[in-house]
Amino acid sequence: MLLLDVIQAGGGFILIEDTVQCSGRGLLRCFINAALKRGEDVHVLGFESPETEVCAGLDSSCVQRLHFHKGFPDPLGWTRRSSFTVERFASQHITQLIKDTQHAKAAVLVADSLSMVLRHHDPVVFCQTLQELRQGGVIKTIIGLLHSDLHQQGIVGIVCHLASTVISVAPADNERHSVAKTTRRTKSGKVMQEEEYFSVSEDATLSVQAKPRQPGHAQKERDVSEADPTSNLTFNLRLSEEERKAKQKVALPFVFSQEKKSALLKPTPGSGRIVYEPDANDDFDEEDPDDDLDV
Amino acid sequence: MFPELNSILNSTPDSFKSSDFILVSDRRADASFLIHHHLSFYLRGLDHNVSGQGVSLAQAREKGQLVFLEGLKNSIGVILQEDTSQETQPLSYLRTPGAGLEGLFRFVERSVRQSGDGDAGESWGPPVLLIDDLSVLLSLGVSVGAILDFTLYCQATVCSELQGNMVILVRCEEEDADDDEEGSNLLRRGLVHQCNLALHVEGLPTGYCRDIHGQMEVWWRQGEETIYNQRKIFHFKVHDKGASFFARGTSSAVL
């Protein structure tokens, strides 16, 4: 269960990719909850959604370890009511923010969302910031939500490349579950991939099921009783016994049968012969090179 | 106001879900009839003395219930630099290319905060913001990112803070394979991410029809409690007195 392993272990840069078809914010809540339960300090940069939505259902006993830095409702500083604007997404500001609000323990940084940051920062600078944060030593885990259908493919590719784990969410056939495709790269270079069904409960816990190999299997069994298609027609599609026998006897044109083979391979008298006189340099082999053909 | 649409969306002028961001979009069809529905829906919710079919927009404007910003009409003045009065501050982004829509947002914010006070000190209740239509800003040269920032701020103020509702119309062009960078489809995707309910109007995939004018997809997106993500498609027909909605295959022409 790769998704459960990732959520319980933490560490590295975990990217949650979503689209309009399926939102990844529920999964983000599960990650926050899991980190809080592990006793880690979680810093959320909330640019896109209110605190009530991002932190809905989180374990109330751990809430004092959660620090929600209010970007929303003023992520760009237009009304001067936010404590952390998108513009301040830089390694020195974030590191300072974390050092100001906690003791020296490895922190978890959650960004909701990275799409908002990418809209206002140069992609190269953004990548540099992420690298600096990862190597800074103050932050143990970075978890970011990215709306992959709002950016060019190249930009999405760059961010995925930086991540140690990428989780893409998509809708599943039934409404209660969604599908998560997890790709995890370890430091040794090994890549693990898995596709799983998951659902998020109201108290931000994740339940995961492995994806069945043949999702269409259940549907196939329902079509057992099919009507006979050759009945009730105005023309005849059936064969009588003689017709069936005659059909079996027809020699297909390009299939080798015994008669055709002997006719082709036996030399007939009077037909051309090949006379070959080998030179001194020739390597003449008496064996028939076609002997091992299974014709 | 269309009663059938009310029952599909499970809302009435007297009891509707507040803090909702409703996105109305269309592609090769005209969804402005849905804007008219919402306009009369919310005005009816304000004034229970409205009788019969009609809601008088002129009266509503006089009472202060309805505030208009004539974007297109005023924008010509701004571009030609004739009118630099206070009235055209919201459209100042037209003169500075690359600027954001902060000025427009300030106008919206002022209007919705003022709308709480009516003529005789009556409170009209939570504000409703209707935008018809947002894709015009794209053709005026504003970037998709700036428009999405503007709608995020409107949602934060109107929906989250003032518990009001917001209805935005976006017109989309044909889906194009390399149209991912800019354009109305990118704008629509960004808005769908933000909204609570998306109504998308398109022509029938099989072509024109006299009795069915198109199909409307209703997409219930996330609320605060659960992640809905339920989608349904209905057919509709627009006529003089309104529009009728029905499940696919149940048009009166067919049955």
Image (cartoon, coloured by chain):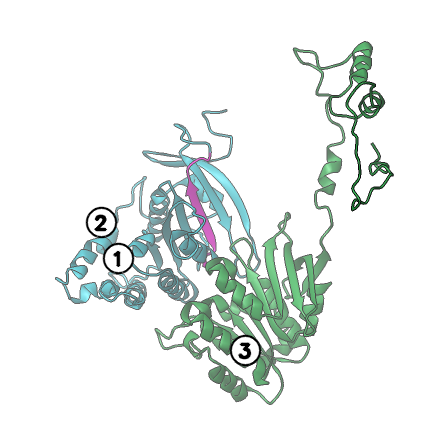
Chain colours: A green, B cyan
**The residue marked by circle 2 belongs to what chain?**
B
Choose mark 3 or mark 2, whichever is in front.
Answer: 3
Choose mark 1 or mark 3, whichever is in front.
Answer: 3
Mark 3 Cα shell of 10 Å, populated few (<14), some (14-19), many (≥20): some
Mark 3 vs 2: CB contact within 8 A: no
Mark 2 vs 1: CB contact within 8 A: no
Q: Position of residue B238 (x, y in %)?
A: 37, 35
Residue at the location (70% across, 46% down)? A215
Q: Position of residue A231 (x, y in %)?
A: 71, 16
Q: Which of the labelled discs sits on residue A131, or is there none?
A: 3
Q: Which of the labelled discs sits on residue A227, or is there none?
A: none
Q: Which of the labelled discs sits on residue B58, or is there none?
A: 2
Callout 1: SS:
loop
**One can see residue A49 in this view:** no
Mark 1 Cα shell of 10 Å, populated few (<14), some (14-19), many (≥20): some
Residue B200 drawn in magenta: yes
Q: Position of residue A235 (x, y in %)?
A: 67, 11
Mark 2 Cα shell of 10 Å, populated few (<14), some (14-19), many (≥20): few
Disc 1 target residue: B67
Residue at the location (53% across, 81% down)? A132
Please state which amino acid type lies under the numbered disc 2: Ala
Callout 2: SS:
helix
Q: Which residues are magenta?
A: B194-205
Callout 3: SS:
helix
Q: Is residue B192 above or below residue A77?
A: above
Give the CA separation, mark 1 to mark 3.
Answer: 49 Å
Give the CA separation, mark 2 to mark 1.
Answer: 10 Å
**The residue marked by circle 1 belongs to what chain?**
B
Image quarter (top left, top right, bottom left or bottom right) of the N terminus of chain A: bottom right
